[in-house]
Amino acid sequence: MELKGLSIGSVHERIASGEVKAVDVCRAALDRIERLSELNAFITVTGDAAIAQAQQIDRLVERGEQLPPLAGAVIAIKDNMVLRGVRTTAGSRILFNYKPPYTATAVERLQSAGAIIVGKTNLDEFAMGSSTENSAYGAVKNPWDTTRVPGGSSGGSAVAVAAGIAMGALGSDTGGSIRQPASLSGVVGLKPTYGRVSRYGLIAFGSSLDQIGPFGNSVEDVARILNIIAGHDPNDSTSSNVEVDDYVAAISGDVRGLRVGVPSEYFGEGLDPEVKENIQAAIKKLDELGAEIVDISLPHTEYAVPVYYLVATAEASSNLARFDGVRYGFRAEEASTLKEMYSRTRDQGFGAEVKRRIMLGTYALSAGYYDQYYGKAQKVRSLIERDFHNAFQKCDVIATPTSPTSAFKLGEKTDDPLEMYLSDIYTITANLAGVPALSLPCGLASNGLPIGIQLIGKQFDEGRLLRAARNLEQALGLEFVPPAIRNI
């Protein structure tokens, strides 16, 4: 059975009509995972459980019962979200054998909506990275060019969708970890407003920044997934009570009169000329569709990277303190004291990037330096939030590049952490401000690799954001199939 190009809506219709069986859809996805194993997109494949989920859908069809909204949709889950009884590693050696006793709220809602969960996807260790090269389970390869990265940290989820394995996937976004891999892999990825989707069951990296969001081959598929996972969760005190829109209904309608802000700070030094050209062409399309293009300024953007890496590492150093060899996963052997066991476990269990961020964060929070670094970073974060508030007085949606370049070579930036951190320079501000942002493909570079445009919306205004993206997607009319998998 051919899965490429199959949308969530179309698979639902075909299963409901009896044209195909959910089990056949599921088996095709599992077969594709095996045939594309070179991409290393999955850490754990949940084949038996997926087949059982598919059989339940087929039994509903046989009994003539109404199907749930995501019935038969094959979905992949980033391996930093827990799934009861299924190994959850967060891409780290320290959790190599951890099987959680509960399921993350977002995943549980997908299962209740009839989605078939085929596996847990590869990621940068504890979601720390911009290339999915920092995983203890090996790097993920980009299906557009297997010598290049897919972006990170949700690279496995982006590749699962780009390679036609899954119709959708969940990722987590702390500083661009959904949008950047979506851009580099040629798919749609959405980071919702902070609090729109429950983080219960997400292994924390930076708690004030983390957000779960969907990947899809189209804006409509992303809207369908968001419809299911959005909404308040009593298990997460940071999840919002703001009413959830019908996002599938929200994407209909045009963009005439929509004010699209273009910040000058996002089109300066460091932006690849080809990326700039494609983004400007996409903005022109929005203009042709009747949107009003408005020049805006986000003046504190230049401070976003240092602010982000102070706030995120400080929160990470606190969140990762729980992984000590006592409560979870890996424990080092040959330790003669409790302190030595802690030390050896963390030394052997964590990778280099995680250790670097824990040390940075611990330093930023230490006595004598808190006000100088972490406290000051939080003050500048408030200025960045104010920038967005002021900008949205003049526009409804902001358009920027998602990434300064197309996908770079595997290993190209691993020896230069600062250059790697700059890969997220255009995505970090949305996390600091807590606003929703989406990346969708808008063209190809001369090297044949996809380029993504980022659209940023007001808090809890995902409906309008998705509508703008849907209109642009239809106007561009791109059909993205990575060449490396066209015959697989």
Image (cartoon, rainbow, N blue to C red):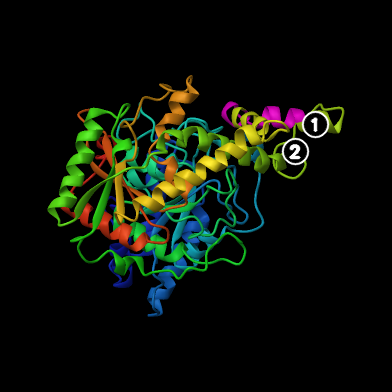
Membership of 353 in magenta stretch: yes
Q: Do labels 1 and 2 touch, CB within 8 Å? A: yes
At a point 48% along the width and 60% down the height, the residue shown is: 196
Membership of 372 in magenta stretch: no
277 vs 30, nearest the viewer: 277
Q: Amino acid at mark 2?
A: Gly
374 vs 362, nearest the viewer: 374
Q: Amino acid at mark 1?
A: Met
Give residue 76's position: percent from left, percent from top: 45, 51
Figure check: 136 above or below 256: above
Element on which disc 1 rests: helix
Give residue 61's position: percent from left, percent from top: 38, 74
Which residue in the structure is indicated by mark 1?
341
At a point 30% along the width and 64% down the height, the residue shown is: 9
The label number, if any, that marks residue 182 in the structure image:
none
Q: Earlier in the sequence, mark 1 or mark 2?
A: 2
181 vs 313, nearest the viewer: 313
Give residue 286's position: percent from left, percent from top: 18, 51
**Quadrant (top left/top right/bottom left/bottom right) for the C terminus:** top left
Neighbours of disc 1 within 10 Å: few (<14), some (14-19), many (20+) = some
At a point 40% along the width and 49% down the height, the residue shown is: 388
Range drawn in magenta: 343-355
Q: Is residue 387 left or right of residue 297?
A: right
Which residue in the structure is indicated by mark 2?
325
Figure check: 454 above or below 410: below
Residue farthest along the right direction in this orientation: 337
386 vs 223, nearest the viewer: 386
Q: Is residue 134 left or right of residue 455?
A: right
